[in-house]
Amino acid sequence: MIVPLCVFALLGSTLAWGGLNQWHELSVNAETGSGGADSCTCDAFLPSSTFPVKDLAVVEQAAEQISHKLEMEMAKIEDYEMKMTQYAEKIIELTREIELLEKKPDANSDATLENMELKIKQVEALVEELKISFKSSGTVFQSLHQEITVMVKSLDQLEKTHDTNLVLQTRREYIKIQMELEECERRHQEIFNPNIGSCDHTGIIKVSKPLVSQLNAQLGTSYIYGGWGKDSKPIPDRESMYWFSGDSSIYIDDIRFYSNYKDLVLRKPFLHHTIPSGWNGLGSNYIVRGNTLYYQKYSPFGLAKYNFTSMTYDSRVIPGASSTFSYANYDHQIFDFAADENGLWVTYATDQSNGKMVIAKINEESFGIEEVWETSVYKPAINNIFMVCGVLYAVRTVDIQNDEIFLMFDTKTKEEKHISIFFERFQDKYSNLDYNPSDQKLYMYTNGYYVNYHLWFNHTATATVEPPFAPTQI
């Protein structure tokens, strides 16, 4: 029995290293010695090139180090966006204090001026720190690319000349790291160089944490109905403009426009327009596009718009639209206007569809309906919807803290797909949620607060459009 056991052991070793044809020579001899004692002699000649475990260990260690660096950089990218918002708010607050000092120059003491000078230097230091962080991230990405290139060459050499079992396992780790690096770079690019206007993606994959600007222009949480945001197709010289409309009732009576974000926060509108009697609106799902307010008309029930360039009103009645079905959180949210890269939309429900959502494409020139799509989404069961690149995204509540984007309907293919993308609410409910294609953000009006979210997309092409701002201009 000794000889078969010896052969089995050698076969086990052979299978561990490779096939029998990889061995130069193998011999097994059995002898019967004096006294009847059996002995087994195994002569094995290993391949001339044994597997360099040390080289593999070096590659594995490099992979771990790169993975750790990637995790750190991805955490930094999340932090950059939060810092930019915080720094912008500091600058606005500082600007407001300086304006107050300029109004009463004689009343300012030396201590007050020195304190202001100190605050300015602190803000300058913060901005400089952020600029250095941007440059640092770019350098790190370049360094990681170089390290991965070296690791690939080492793996290729190992795989060509030695056993492939362990090498392939390490290669899988490398592929995972490479994908993480590409994901990190993609997210970095989307924040600092987004592909504005492009639909070369397969949809939303992530929503940021809520970024809260402040309380509304009336400084009251009782103004729960309303909306805010930017013009989705701004006219020249209005690219930085913001708008706001809000009330404690369900009616739309006026709207304010602000030249930029600073004026929005300082509550300094350049235009406050009051909607005349007979053109009053209802609900909160309105938007501004092409310097035109699109909203739900109170009476007769239908669509309305006001162009601030021509200063003219227009309205349309939609046959079949029902005034019965609203969103889960608020009544009277019948018509929901939306704008994206493909144009202007309005959604509503009909009695014929038993309350299910209908998507209608609007011709902006004629204010007529071009095409209609029916979905399976029951409107009273959801909180809101928004459109991105001709795709409807439906949102519902999942718990006391989070909402979920749970369904997408593609108007191009007429296909529905269930998805699950969670995002955090700032308050328990909101009256307005809209996507803006000019900066690829979601704008939410929730219990009187301005809130926005950054969106990440599964891009299929690299960015080709310059960012709307440069990081050094914060």
Image (spheres, helix red, strand yellow):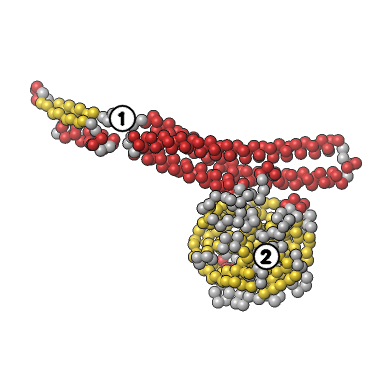
**Which residue corresponds to mark 2?**
286
- Residue 258 at x, y = what percent? 75, 56
Tell me which amino acid carries mark 1: Ser
Of the pair 465 and 380, the residue shown nearer to us: 465
- Near-viewer residue (436 or 393): 436
Q: Is residue 117 above or below residue 382?
A: above
Residue drawn where x is 66% and y is 65% of the image = 285
Q: Quadrant of the C terminus?
A: top right
Would residue 469 appear left or right of 142 to someone viewing this image? Answer: right
The answer to whether residue 331 is seen in the rendering is no
- For marks 2 and 1, the one nearer the N-term is 1
Q: Residue at x 71, y 36 (%)?
A: 125
Residue 143 shows up from this direction:
yes
Q: Is residue 83 above or below residue 294?
A: above
Q: Amino acid at mark 2?
A: Tyr
Around disc 2, counting alpha carbons within 10 Å, would you say few (fewer than 14), some (14 to 19), or many (20 or more)? many
For the N terminus, the image quarter is top left
Query: In the image, residue 57 lies at what x, y percent?
Result: 41, 32
Residue 223 image offset from top left, x and y in percent:
72, 61
Pick the front one: 432 or 149: 149
**The residue tagged with tag 1: helix, strand or loop?**
loop
Contact, mark 2 vs mark 1 (Cβ under 8 Å): no
Residue plotted at (57% across, 42% down): 75
**Within-10-Å neighbours for mark 1: few <14, some 14–19, many 20+:** few
The residue at the point 64 percent across, 49 percent down is 467
The reply, left or right, for residue 37 in relation to residue 278 is: left
Residue 64 in percent (x, y) is at: 47, 36
| Cα–Cα span, label 2 and label 1 | 73 Å
Q: Which residue is mark 1?
A: 49
* Quarter-of-image position of residue 197: bottom right
